[in-house]
Amino acid sequence: MPTLTIKGLPDPVYRRLKQQAEAHRRSLNGEIIVCLERAVAAGRVDPNAWLADACAFRQRIAIRPLSARQLSAARQAGRA
């Protein structure tokens, strides 16, 4: 099995990885392997497929898009 050395790892990243490892009851090495596996397996999102899924979901739950007037009112309410 290959070995990997990481040079120049920022202290905040190291601390966060250490905290995550403790929270998941893993060694630091084990936590890093899990993080790398997730990052590599994530893959790239196809925007057209994502939009098609969002449209299909919207149709299933029967929510209509907001009108320009509704969006404007929501923006104004958020600034109040």
Image: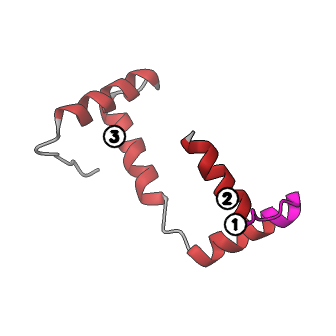
**Residue with the mark numbered 2:** 71
Residue drawn at point x = 39 percent, y = 28 percent: 20
- Residue tagged by mark 1? 68
> What span is in magenta?
57-68
Left of 6 or right of it: where is 36? Answer: right
Q: Is residue 60 magenta?
A: yes
The image shows residue 15 at horizontal and vertical percentages of 26, 27
Q: Residue at x 62, y 78 (%)?
A: 48
| Residue 17 position by quadrant | top left
Q: Quadrant of residue 18?
A: top left
Tell me the element at label 2.
Answer: helix
Between residues 3 and 73, which one lies in front from this camera angle? 73
Tell me the kind of residue under disc 1: Ala
| Gap in angstroms between the C-alphas marked 3 and 2 | 43 Å
Callout 2 amino acid: Leu
Which is nearer the N-term, disc 3 or disc 1? 3
Query: CB of mark 2 within 8 Å of CB of mark 1?
Result: yes
Q: Which residue is under mark 3?
A: 32
| Distance between the alpha carbons at the discs numbered 2 and 1 | 5 Å
Q: Earlier in the sequence, mark 3 or mark 2?
A: 3
Mark 3 residue type: Ile
Determine the secondary structure under disc 3: helix
In this picture, is 69 found above or below 29? below
73 or 36: nearer the eye?
73
Q: What element carries label 1?
A: helix
Task: Choose between 25 and 64: the one closer to the eye.
Answer: 64
